[in-house]
Image (cartoon, grey):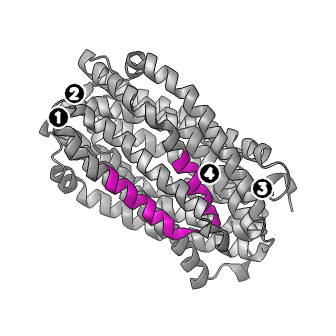
Amino acid sequence: MEKQAVYSMTEGSPARLLLRFTVPMLIGNLFQQFYNMVDSIVVGRFVGANALASVGATGSLNFLFFAMSFGVAAGVGVVVSQYFGADRMDMVEKSIINGMYLLAVVSALMGVAGILTARWVLEALDTPAVILDDAVVYMRVSCAGILAIAAYNGVASVLRALGDSKTPLYFMVAACFINIGLDLLFVVVFDWSVFGVALATVIAQLVAAAGAFAYALYKIPYFHIKRENRPVRRDIIARCFTLGLPIALQNALIAFSCIFLQKVVNGFGESVVAANTALGRIEQIVQQPYGSLGAALTTYTGQNIGAGRIDRVKQGYKAGFWSVVAFSIVMLIPCQLLGEQIVGVFVTDPEVIAIGARGLAITSCFYFFLGMIYVARSVLNGAGDAAFAMINGLMEVAGRVGFAVPLTRIAFIGVWGIFLTTGLTWALTGIMSMGRYHRGKWEFKGI
């Protein structure tokens, strides 16, 4: 066993362990979002606001088609972390290989579905005609790359389940620089516009996946799957699917609610679509500390549930709570005072900047609830409380569907109801998530 390659989180200071795990995750996620931002900046500045809007119009749809792969990857990670925490090493190997079988099939099916339905779905969402063709191209290329994205997330999820959050970072950083270079080459030099941006992202993710997989084969003993552990195990696939499906459906429901909101956004025209796209990119960056902490808590919880350490799980939740409080306060100030400068990084159109800045001032008031969604949900997922993932997704649907139309139809709110809907949805879902954690049913889940 190569001790430096895997790390147990069942002993030691919970806060220190979470910090050690979160920081590399955060850096990696920021790089991932950075090259997503580069896509938007290159398109917005070198092609135009309409091209930026076409990329933004596909965001929720792409997330919907990616949701199943992301959910399965997360389910595999939970299963691996629990068996690792329980010191059942043969089951770790079996979970890895069977999880990858499941992930490959699911990703291929979702990729084909996305490619075939792209135009129909975008038209059904009333995507403005001026951006429709570019949006179809971006969505189809992105869906063609689902296997690459799923492969990276699958390997990364297993590595994190084994306590290694640093290695995925290295390959994500490399992919980031490849993506930036290809963005500039494909868009500025080759003039491939939206197609070039999408292709650059897919190639970068493919490089990250190949690198992470090669490392895992070389350094992690559990990836040297013994012959007797390679056959298909329906029970393991079923457990990965049982834990992953609710997370996938949660992601799909969140995507559906965002698609509904996108339809409302589309009704306000290209400027609002572009502003909402820029704001979405900003909020993706803001969410990275929360998401990274959440990933740490999922692994931490899974390992400690496997080891029977409920007390340590509760200590981890408290550490996560105070981290969210601190970061939310830090981020609120620049979002309130420097909104125009922040949005202006993405676009130059004064109208788009003004709309985006005011929207940012509204949504930033709700960052605490956004953070607690990640903290509570991640503890619950790590414990194997799969049922709540569905409830969590339904809450997001209820929020976006329930708030969007009524708020935007109130005369003195109008377009600002779009951004208020986002914030109120975070508040509703965050409160529900914290309530579920404090009811304590998660303590009786696990292997």
Q: Can you give x and y, in whole percent of width and height, for residue 102 in the image? A: 52, 72
Circle 4 crowding by C-alpha within 10 Å: few under 14, some 14–19, many from 20: many
Quadrant of image for the N terminus: bottom right
Q: Is residue 88 above or below residue 190?
A: below
Residue corresponding to mark 3: 219
At x 32%, y 56%, the residue is: 398
- Tag 1 or tag 3, which sits nearer the N-term? 3
Outermost residue, left direction? 129
Circle 3 crowding by C-alpha within 10 Å: few under 14, some 14–19, many from 20: some
Magenta span has 377? Answer: yes
- Confirm or deny contact between disc 4 and disc 3 (CB under 8 A): no
Residue corresponding to mark 4: 295
Residue corresponding to mark 2: 271
Q: Is residue 133 at least partly visible in the picture?
A: no
Q: Is residue 8 at least partly visible in the picture?
A: yes
Which amino acid type corresponds to the residue marked 3 in the rendered image?
Lys
Looking at the rendering, the stretch of residues picked out in magenta corresponds to 372-399
- Confirm or deny contact between disc 1 and disc 4 (CB under 8 A): no
| Mark 1 vs mark 2: in front | 1
Label 1 residue SS = loop
- Confirm or deny contact between disc 1 and disc 2 (CB under 8 A): yes
| Mark 4 vs mark 3: in front | 4
C-alpha separation, residue under disc 2 versus residue under disc 3: 49 Å
